[in-house]
Image (cartoon, grey):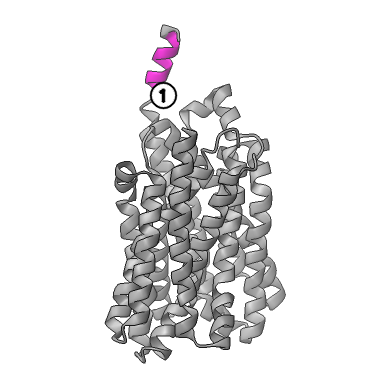
């Protein structure tokens, strides 16, 4: 390398912390937007007088939009690069809130949710691809910190949504103000969003290309599917389990998913340090075992307080698995990060959607308590899968 190139590298290095700030802000914004919508769903149901069945069909449009986006996002990154897709999808996701605010019928709500889902899926793949490329340049583990900010954004968005709803602020005003505010935050993030190495031809090549199918990619997809299936199932069934099986009141029942989410956010804050100490797959294997233990505690003891402890342990155990799975997918040899991440996020999101109906079907055949043992089995199986990936990565290194 010439002395001129060395000077350029030194000039570029100070840009990395600012790039990390930008990507962190993008993850926070994603969590805020998603939670803003989720926190006001009851308001839309009441205002448009939607039955549970019709609301369910409308919500499915968001899922369809996300799945479609995740199938094409890898190709979009290959053509335009992750930077452009982060910018376009972030602004599109902010725009989705005012579109939802102006929905006046089930048809317009469904179309707005289709757009909302497409932007959410595109942004998910783009920002994770960008985070993987940034982590490469940092040459240390930083992926968990980004997902921690997504979790914190979700918690803050949910809390703010509940607060403004309690003051009877309309969802239309809430969504317009949130959309504009978050768009401005996005513009701030875009100022430093470009990664220094992506200014070079080699950096552009690293961001683009095709997916290379392999046993490792398939194993990571299965791991993402399993872990997010557990997350999706607990999101929908933890409160119902506490109400129906542990006979708690509605306030206590709501703490179940809250304990899970808070522990997950805290686990992600410390996740990068633990990943550096233990390694990606070693930590994932331990985390899945902690999840299995936590779920077992929640199911074996009749005291509802043990269920809260179990759900918290499950959140802590699962906290770093998805960030590390995404990071590993973005670093598969000879496979483009964007294309690989599109596969992994698609598999994970499908698991998230499949979890609630799977548990519901099993509960109908038996009961909810027994059905939730499926999640214990999945956690234990994921621990074995992560251990196998650890052995495979060591063998190939």
Asked whether the viewer can see residue 390, the reply is yes
Membership of 179 in magenta stretch: no
Say above or below: 121 vs 56.
above
Q: Which residue is mark 1?
A: 12
Give the residue drawn at x 59%, y 42%. Answer: 338
Residues packed near mark 1 inside 10 Å, few (<14), some (14 to 19) or many (20 plus): some
| Residue 273 horizontal side relative to residue 342, left or right | left
State whether residue 185 appears in this view.
no
Counting labels gives: 1
Q: Quadrant of residue 137?
A: top left
Could you tell me residue 96's position as x and y percent?
59, 61
Out of 357 and 189, give the one closest to the viewer.
357
Instruction: Please tell me which residue is depicted at 48% across the width and 47% down the height of the picture.
Output: 389
Magenta residues span 4-12
Using the rendered view, name the quadrant where residue 267 is placed: bottom left
**Main SS of residues in magenta:** helix
């Amino acid at each position: 390398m010439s002395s001129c190139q060395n000077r350029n590298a030194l000039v570029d290095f100070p840009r990395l912390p600012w790039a990390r700030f930008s990507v962190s802000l993008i993850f926070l914004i994603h969590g805020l937007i998603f939670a803003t919508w989720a926190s006001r769903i009851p308001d839309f149901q009441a205002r448009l007088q939607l039955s549970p069945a019709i609301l369910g069909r409308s919500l499915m449009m968001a899922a369809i939009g996300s799945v479609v986006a995740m199938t094409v996002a890898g190709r979009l990154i290959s053509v335009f690069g992750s930077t452009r897709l982060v910018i376009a999808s972030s602004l599109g996701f902010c725009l989705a809130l005012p579109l939802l605010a102006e929905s006046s019928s089930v048809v317009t709500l469904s179309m707005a949710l289709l757009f909302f889902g497409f932007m959410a899926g595109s942004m998910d793949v783009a920002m994770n691809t960008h985070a993987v490329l940034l982590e490469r340049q940092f040459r240390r583990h930083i992926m968990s910190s980004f997902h921690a900010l997504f979790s914190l954004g979700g918690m803050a968005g949910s809390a703010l949504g509940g607060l403004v709803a309690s003051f009877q602020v309309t969802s239309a005003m809430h969504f317009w103000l949130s959309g504009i505010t978050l768009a401005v935050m996005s513009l701030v993030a875009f100022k430093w969003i470009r990664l220094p190495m992506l200014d070079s031809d080699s950096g552009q090549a690293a961001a683009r290309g095709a997916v290379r199918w392999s046993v490792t990619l398939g194993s990571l997809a299965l791991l993402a599917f399993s872990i997010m299936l557990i997350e999706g199932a607990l999101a929908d069934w933890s409160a119902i389990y506490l109400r129906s099986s542990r006979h708690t009141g509605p306030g206590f029942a709501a703490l179940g998913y809250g304990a899970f989410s808070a522990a997950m956010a805290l686990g992600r804050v410390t996740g990068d340090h633990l990943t550096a100490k233990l390694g990606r797959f070693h930590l994932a294997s331990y985390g899945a075992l902690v999840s299995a233990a936590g779920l077992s505690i929640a199911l074996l003891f009749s005291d509802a307080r043990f269920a809260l402890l179990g759900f918290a342990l499950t959140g802590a155990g699962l906290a770093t698995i998805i960030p590390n799975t995404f990071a590993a997918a973005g670093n598969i040899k000879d496979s483009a990060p964007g294309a690989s991440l599109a596969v992994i996020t698609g598999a994970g999101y499908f698991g998230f959607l499949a979890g609630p109906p799977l548990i519901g079907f099993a509960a109908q055949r038996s009961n909810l308590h027994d059905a939730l043992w499926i999640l214990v089995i999945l956690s234990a199986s994921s621990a074995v899968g992560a251990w196998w990936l650890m052995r495979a990565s060591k063998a190939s290194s």
